Amino acid sequence: MTDQTSVPDSEENSTPERGSPSSFGDSSSRPTASLVVERARDGHQVREAQRLRWIVFAEEQGARILTPESGYDIDPLDEYCRHILVRDTRTGYVVACTRILYQEDADRAGGFYSESEFDLTAIRLAPGRTMEMGRTCVHPDYRKTVTISLLWTGIAQYTAFRDYARIIGCASIPMGQNRGAGALAVYHDLMARCPSPVDLRVVPKHPLPEGLAPASEPQAPSLLMAYVRYGAVVCGPPCWDPGFDTADLLMMLPAENVGPRYLRRFVERKRDVPDRSPPDA
């Protein structure tokens, strides 16, 4: 959902900016008890998220990101979004992040990010308001269930989560050497397991090539499957994102799917008043 310098191999060769882990160390050395979730309150914290996004999307995954400053994934929608961060208090580094765009702010910004990839007419016409979750990433050393859960906790705590009918977002699958065959297999698998209502389907603006045969075994990224476990449904065929070289699925979490097994425990744990003020980044 969702452009090249190298991440240093060790801190001996560079002094990383706070919030920018400089190496992908052994994940077994990362205790989860030191992780906390927070909302970005100023531009510096947003910049920490942008740095992490660069490390994951550009350095690790090879995305070609259009940004005014190399080393940071700076996107025009950032100033309209609420940014949720997971920080390791032992190091001070931001190790996971996502951003939330309310429908009202998307309208001010010229549209949701998803609208650059999909025709969202059906969702736009549906009753209730929509919020978008995007640019979600987790540092490789912290890709554990608890980290994703903390991001969801942050959404519950720091946004007007319960005032919206649905959350949407682009979930990315690498195109890979099979040029989308794996993504197509994932799409068919999810459409059989968790399809959206027919009247909430979307149309990709850059569909995968016609005649492409799906791979024999669907291999969905763990982040995408976490969305499915939380009750998300797939809204239509994938869209090719040439910048990130991914096949993106438009996923939607309807409010009625927020059940007790997963998200409700986060919503009921809210400790802050939801943030309805304009983004301060």
Image: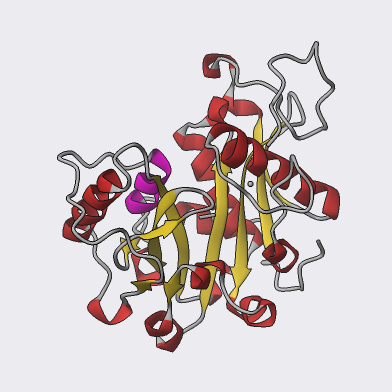
At 27% from the left and 39% from the top, the residue drawn is 219
Is 218 drawn above or below residue 83 in the view shown? above
Scheme by which the image is coloured = secondary structure
Q: Position of residue 6 (x, y in %)?
A: 69, 27
> In the image, 169: left or right of 153?
left
Q: Position of residue 129 (x, y in %)?
A: 51, 81
Foreground residue among 273 and 279:
279
Residue 270 visible in the current orientation: no
> In the image, 223: left or right of 177?
right
Among the 4 quarters of the image, the one containing residue 204: bottom left
Among the 4 quarters of the image, the one containing residue 275: bottom right
Among the 4 quarters of the image, the one containing residue 106: bottom right
Q: For the view shown, which residue lies furthest in the top direction?
A: 12
Foreground residue among 265 and 62:
62
Q: Position of residue 228 (x, y in %)?
A: 33, 52
Residue 159 visible in the current orientation: yes
Is 141 drawn above or below residue 194 in the view shown? above
Q: Position of residue 174 (x, y in %)?
A: 40, 43
Q: Which residues are magenta?
A: 222-229
At 23% from the left and 62% from the top, the residue drawn is 210
Residue 175 lies in the magenta-colored region: no
Is 231 drawn above or below residue 35 in the view shown? below
At 31% from the left and 59% from the top, the residue drawn is 208
Is 235 drawn above or below residue 3 in the view shown? below
Residue 227 lies in the magenta-colored region: yes
At 77% from the left and 15% from the top, the residue drawn is 11
**How many numbered circles are shown?**
0
Quarter of the picture containing the C terminus is bottom right
Q: Mostly what secondary structure, the magenta segment?
A: helix
